[in-house]
Image: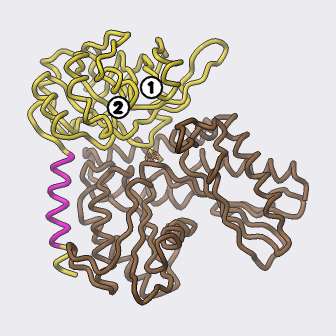
Amino acid sequence: MIMTTPISEEVIRSLHVGQVVEVSGSVFTGRDSVHRHLYDGGKCPVDMRGSAIYHCGPVVVKENGVWVVKAAGPTTSIREEPYQADVIRMLGLRGVIGKGGMGKQTLEACREHGCVYMHAIGGAAQVLADVVTEVKDVYFLEKFGSPEAIWHFAVERFPVVITMDTHGNSLHSDVEGDSQKKLQELIAGI
Amino acid sequence: MNTKSLQASLLELVRRTSCDLPPDVESTLRRALAREQKGTTAKYALEVVHKNIALAREKSLPICQDTGSILFYVTGPKDLDSRAFRKAGDAAVKAATELGYLRQNSVDSLTGKNSGTNLGPGSPVYHFEQGSKRTIAVRLILKGGGCENVGIQYALPNGALGAGRDLAGVEKCLLDAVYKAQGKGCAPGILGVCIGGDRAIGFAHSKEQFLRTLEDKNPNPTLAKLETRVMKKANALGIGPMGFGGKTTLLGCKIGALNRLPASFFVSISYMCWAYRRRGCVIGGSGKVSRWLYT
Ligand code: SF4
């Protein structure tokens, strides 16, 4: 399934954990500095409504005056857990892209505001750089430095797996729960 | 030794390590891909991983943008000038960073400032050992931060796990560590383990296990059996690639043992992600590479 931004609330609410989808259109990188800035009441310099924020510190270089993305894999999302719910609400996000999943507050915000957590494949820096077709703009480059800046990427068929949906399901807590049961069985058998 | 040639050899070693996954890791990942069921997210994740490995190799770009800690393991003749070697290694790392083979990845712990060169206290790391040959064998591991964060050290006995000071206790710790890591270390991963030692040497020895290939067999039959057991059980946990659920949670488990003090019993566990970047070469008297390792 390919989803093009801006993504409607209806489409987002039709998604379920475990689904593989591809995102086309706009995604915006943002990690620790951006999240803290927004949480502290700072302004967002760009309208992200209907699109996704991507937890990623990309490697971007300027070649002949044009920004080129050299590597763009996801970073660990859980660090943004204290801020994410507010950021989803404030920016009108339909997706949060990252790796490792997030916690209860974010899951609740996904249910309330119509947003999903999209898990990118950790370490797949080249595959994910390859689907960035253009760097549209960059914000906070001087203030936060390149990896922490907001990079506006135009993407084509950016591959993700839905691991937290609007129905209160989290693949992460499911897998953790199942593996914990299995672990107890295994330990009892040693 | 010709410093320029040595530097060039080490630069090529860094490039290969960062951009070209070794064959034993790639074939283990391929077997994992074949094992996962069609239409699952586990299979999908591994397909993307394979695509990524091929793209990085083709473009000569980093497999993962977190180029990680830079760990050199050097075995040289008795008159190896370790200071000169460090200088050449530092220069190669700096050049590799400028060329984009490595991300600017070394941050001052007090000021938060990125050195921009990957050089600084503790980076890169060099381990020197004396060998019996005239040549220098250099092995390099790049170890990412995500997987380093899920490393863990247990002190036995451990009441919560019911783990005593024996191999059964060790086995319980290893399974618990895999469970705790879930997909966060970019599973499927590899465990490097040290039984015994003190807290520092335990972790150091656990990382040295990553110098072994995934296909080798532990020369100690007791440890070899433990490795096989842990692999089987850990993969039954169902955590799967990226923690999506699936059959492949671990690609390897490599265990070493050191003597311990009667008062302590540590089990030190390092976790390596699927982007298991390890390469090596033998460098002759001229400073040029005479042979590549792990090919
Ligand atoms: S854990 Fe490994 S694969 Fe994952 S982001 Fe870090 S270096 Fe890359």
Residue for badge 1? A131
User: What residue is drawn where x is 49% and y is 49%?
Assistant: B144
Q: Colour of chain B?
A: brown
User: What residue is drawn where x is 36% and y is 41%?
Assistant: A76
Q: Disc 1 or 2, which lies upstream in sequence?
A: 1
Mark 1: secondary structure: loop
Q: Confirm whether the magenta stretch covers residue A174.
A: yes
Q: Confirm whether the magenta stretch covers residue B244.
A: no
User: What residue is drawn where x is 45% and y is 19%?
Assistant: A151
- Left/right placement of residue A151 relative to residue B125 reads left
Q: Which residues are magenta?
A: A172-185
Specify whether disc 1 shares its chain with disc 2: yes
Inter-mark Cα distance, 1 to 2: 9 Å
Identify the mark at residue A159; answer none if there is no mark.
2
Q: Colour of chain A?
A: yellow
Q: Position of residue A169 (x, y in %)?
A: 12, 39
The answer to whether mark 1 and mark 2 are in CB contact below 8 A is yes
Q: Kindly tell me whether mark 1's CB lies below 8 Å from ligand 1.
A: no
Quarter of the image with the N terminus of chain B in it: bottom right
